[in-house]
Image (cartoon, rainbow, N blue to C red):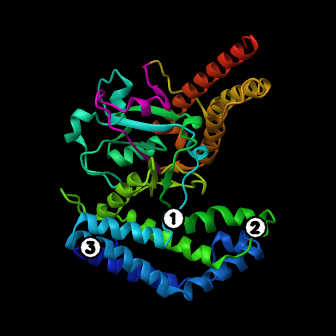
Amino acid sequence: MSSFGYDRFENRLKEYKKIYLNKLIKLVSVNKCSCNYHFNSSDEYINFTDKFLYLLKNNMLIFDEIFDILINVYDIFITKSYKHAADYFWNTISIFNLMGRSEIPMSYSHLLYRARKIGDYSKITDFFHIPFDRRELVVNNRFSISGQPMIYFGNSIMTLTKELDLDVDNLSIAAFLPKYSIYYPLNINEVENSIFSIFVNSLPALFNAGSNIKFNEKLYIIEMRRTIFCELLTFPCKIKGTFVEEYVLPQLFTSLLIDNNYKGVIFPSTKNFSEITNYHRFSKYNKNLALFVDYNENDNYDLKLLNTFYYFVLDGSEKFEYTTNDIIQIFEKVINLHKKFSESVNNNDYILPIVNSKLYIEYLEEPKINGINYFKTKEGRIELEFFYKLADKLFILIAENIKRATGIDP
């Protein structure tokens, strides 16, 4: 926000670069920090992060360069053309290995949420992408292409309320579960702060578990570039109008993903989640998934894509009284049924969503929103209802497969 004093986005980016690099150079060793990482980390972790700190301070010109190159993509867009900017951008991504990893389907084989402003929706397509004959309704989103319908999911209902800027009471909500076996071969890119993910989420646990990890200077220079890339793709908006300056880079990136046979992109929400406290570092409640849809001449929706999901809606029978313990016990019944007949039903479509959903609940049991435990808020209670519907559906599917394979009706 310190860079918001500048009217032009290119100048805000240049100011942000100065602030970012100035903070990098002032970083100190974890050993001199008063944070939990100093007191709870192994000597190996501290030594590893010291090497990374040394790497940062001795390669500032490299990080200064990637800022300038990415800012130049925007400059080319506003001074020349979309094509010039897109070509330069793709060359930059390729040369500096900015694309990052493709997210593995196992990690997003869980409930994803869609919402519309509250209304009478009778079909699941009402919750799907904007129909092809209503392209005028396609709004200007960060990871989007003008006039081209896409479908956006939130990892949590809380994220939906943030993205749509509506209270949960003003939303009609549906949940979608990707079928793992269909999504397994697809490329879905993730935009993330990879340095945070590595040094905060992964390495402390690995070192405390006794893992021996070698420091790879080349790798961490690449990861720093990718982190800077993520920062610019998710740069907060100052003003939203017909043209949103901050959307140029992510929208260019989206078009390049489509051109290069990616099916979607996972990205962090840029909304303010400051009211949530005590959240687990592995929780991904604030992530979004955008999927690209294929045009159909005869149908108004990408029905092939729709059929890659199981989906759930609220039908009015819900009492919103489930606790997290209730849902975990129901999940255990599904897991036990699957284990008992695993030779007959060895299908990741059924078990992975339960395993991931259990982890999701565990990661969000402690966090509070304005002092209230997440699963006691309206958003959390609705999610628990959807988890019940998920477990019920998967139990039935597993039972049907057991009966088909063995003749036994469990």
Residue 28 visible from this viewpoint: no
> Which badge, 3 or 2, comes first in the chain's sequence?
3
At numbered mark 2, what does the secondary structure look like: helix, strand or loop? helix
Q: Which residue is mark 2?
A: 207
Locate residue 300, reporting x and y percent: 29, 29
Image quadrant containing the C terminus: top right
Q: Residue at x 29, y 27 (%)?
A: 298
Q: Residue at x 66, y 82 (%)?
A: 50
Q: Residue at x 60, y 74 (%)?
A: 220
Residue 76: which numbered mark, if any? 3
Q: Which residue is mark 1?
A: 193
Residue 220's place in the image compared with 346, above or below, is: below
Give the amino acid type for the residue marked by disc 3 in the picture.
Answer: Ile
> Which badge, 2 or 1, comes first in the chain's sequence?
1
Using the numbered discs, state the Cα–Cα distance from disc 1 to disc 3 in whole angstroms: 25 Å
> Which badge, 1 or 3, comes first in the chain's sequence?
3
Using the numbered discs, state the Cα–Cα distance from disc 2 to disc 1 in whole angstroms: 21 Å
At numbered mark 1, what does the secondary structure look like: helix, strand or loop? loop
Residue 58's place in the image compared with 157, above or below, is: below
Magenta residues span 287-316
Marks 2/1 in contact by CB < 8 Å: the verdict is: no
Locate residue 46, reporting x and y percent: 71, 77
Q: Quadrant of residue 182?
A: top right
